[in-house]
Amino acid sequence: MSSKHLAAAATVITVLLWACAFVVIRSVGAVLSPGAMAFARLLVGSAALALVALRYRRPLPRGRALAFVLGYGLAWFAAYTVVLNWAEQHLDAGTAALLVNVAPILVTVVAGIVFHDGFPRPVIVGMGVAFTGVVLITVGGNGSGAVDSLGIVLGLVTAVLYAAGVLMQKVALRSVDAVTATWVGCAAGLVATAPFAPQAVGELAHASGGAIAGVIFLGIGPTAIAFTTWAKRGKRYAWMGAPRWAPGGGITAAPNSGS
């Protein structure tokens, strides 16, 4: 299979698994609290990634690269996951996915200015469509007041965290392989969410089999597999344009001709 086809396959796998994650988070969130779900998900993901990393046996990142990997691990794996879980207790899965897709707008603006990726016309159009969708969600809603407002704010916070994670990962992947970067980043997120461990143990002890299966799916599918395929694609295109799909969401604008 050519590298072009592999990149396309990685994109499809990532988008599908992250799209499924929104629905599963909404369902499991009825049983597990945001922090507990995040810790359990990252525990499963870190274990799965550790097995893959041991097989690859690549050197661990150091210095500046390690700082960026840890940074995106804390922002993306830890903070983003907790806040998204919280947001989906106030929003339906589809609305949360749309709000998170503000992130590609932020990534595109920063990448265009800082990394000189430019602003091709299709990207500008996609940004406009994404922004319009977010505005409609913000001014719409079902009229439940504070609940809607809190959910919208949390959704937008997840977008900022996602954008920060993507940009730090973009730099890290210049010198760190995709598997190692994903594993170390996920492990950093696990450590950051460790304070929720006792709560996770207590809640999982009384959780249904379906909820536990949902957590395992989130850890293996959207975390271990999808974040690795995302990073592998990002590694190939890390300095050729910013990716434009969101974790758990979908493609908001087609990658530009250089991505």
Image (tube, helix red, strand yellow):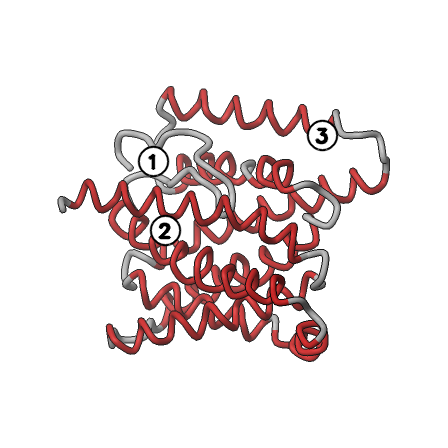
Label 2 – label 1 distance at C-alpha: 19 Å
Label 2 – label 3 distance at C-alpha: 29 Å
Tell me which amino acid carries mark 3: Thr
Residue receiving disc 3 = 138
Considering every residue shown, the one lying at the far left of the view is 2
Q: Residue at x 30, y 47 (%)?
A: 10
Q: Earlier in the sequence, mark 2 or mark 1?
A: 1
Q: Residues within 10 Å of mark 1 (few under 14, many from 20)?
A: some
Camera-nearest residue between 71 and 92 = 92
Q: Residue at x 50, y 34 (%)?
A: 105
Q: Quadrant of the C terminus?
A: top left
Helix, strand, or loop for circle 2?
helix
Q: Residues within 10 Å of mark 3 (few under 14, many from 20)?
A: some
Which-is-in-front pick, marks 2 and 1?
Answer: 2
Residue receiving disc 2 = 230
Q: Residue at x 39, y 69 (%)?
A: 183
Tell me which amino acid carries mark 1: Asp
Helix, strand, or loop for circle 1?
loop
Q: In the displayed structure, would residue 158 be above or below residue 255?
A: below
